[in-house]
Each structure stands twice: as C-alpha cells, then as structure tokens.
Image (tube, helix red, strand yellow):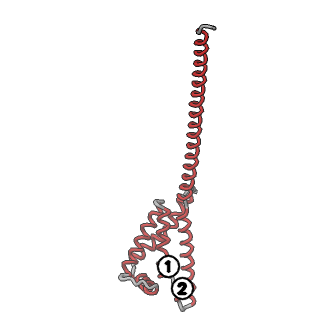
Amino acid sequence: MAVLRRITRPLLATPFVIEGVRTLRRPHPLATGTGSLARHLGAPVDDPLRVVRLNAAVQIGAGGLLALGRLPRTASLVLAASLVPTTLAEHAWWKEEDPRLRKDQFLQFAQRIGLFGALLLGAADTHGKPSAAYRARTATTRSRKKAHRAATRAAGHVHAAIDTVGSGASAAASGTGRAMHSAADSARAKLPHQ
C-alpha cells in the first residue's frame, strides 16, 4: 500500500497544480464566473480576481503537499474544499443552452465529482493505522482497565494488611492471655495452701 500511496498522491495532485498555475496566468475568465456565482448565492465578492488567485495559490500549495506526501489528509481536505467553488464557477452545465456545450460541461462536472470523491478517500486514509478517535477510545478503555486493576490490587493489599494486623493482634492477645494465665497460675502456686 505504501508504494500505491507514493504513486497515487502525485497523480491526484497533478490536475490541481496545473489548474492553479493556469488560473494564476489567466485569472480573468474564472473571476467572471466566480463573481456571477457569488452574486447568485447571495454572497457578493468585492474582488473576484483576488479570490480566484487565492484559490489558485491554495490549489498549488495543497497539491504540492499532497504530491510530496506532506500532511496528505489535510492537503486532500483543502483541495476538496477548493474544488467546490471552481467546479461550480467553471462547469455550470445547467446554464448552457447549446446541447453539445451542455454535454461537455456535464462531463467536466462529473469528472470533478470523481476527483472530489478521490480527495475524500485521501482525507480518510490513515496509512493502515487506526484513526485518532479509535486510538482515543482505546486509550480511555485501557486507562479504565488499568485503574480498575490497580484499585483491585490496592484493595487486596489493604485486606491483606488488615488480616495481618488482625492476626497479629489476635496472636498478641492470645499470647498476652496465656502469659496472664501462666502468671496467675504461678502466683497461686506460691500462695500457701490451706
């Protein structure tokens, strides 16, 4: 699996790096679509050109990280998030009147959905290691078991100590009782008989 990860990560990152570079070179066509999309969603953008450039820089940076295997889960999530606005701005197939353009845009849109799914898989990939949530649950369970065993051992030691003290006290009392009985017998033996 490690070899597969080394191969697939750069392959998955490549379109984002290429698109980011292309967008930085020619941001104006995408800026128009971004401004239109933002207005349609009710969130007008003051400077769509700046937003497009920022998104392109994010795609290049996160794509580079993913390709190098650095922070791959985070990079995958960032790329997935950056893919949504660019897909909606560039491939709004539902707006096309021409059936041929509509079909081409739909195909591009579907490919982007596939990329989105691959990025989600990349974000969920834990390299065969358990997730952080699983490790936390397991650690909590282990801690509880250790605490229970420690408490059981401590209780056993306390009971043993009590038994030891009780046995010692009983033996001491028994010994004291025998000594007193013996002293009383000795004292009676020394008394004159009548």
Quadrant hosting residue 151: top right
Residue behind mark 2: 93
Type of residue at label 2?
Trp
- Residue drawn 57% across and 34% down? 162
User: Which residue is most to the front?
Assistant: 194
In the rendered image, residue 153, in percent from the top left (x then y), is placed at 58, 40
Q: Which of 147 and 6 is in front in this view?
A: 147
- Of the pair 154 and 22, the residue shown nearer to us: 154
Q: Which mark is residue 87?
A: 1
- Would residue 2 be seen by someone viewing this image from the given angle? no
**Snapshot quadrant of residue 18:** bottom left
Neighbour tally class for label 1: few under 14, some 14-19, many 20 plus, Cα within 10 Å: some
Coordinates of residue 134 in the picture (x, y in percent): 56, 57
The three-letter code of the residue at mark 1 reads Thr
**Left or right: 165 in relation to 27:** right
Q: Residue at x 36, y 83 (%)?
A: 46
Task: Determine whether the residue tagged by mark 2 lies in a helix, strand or loop.
Answer: helix
Specify which label sits upstream in the sequence, 2 or 1: 1
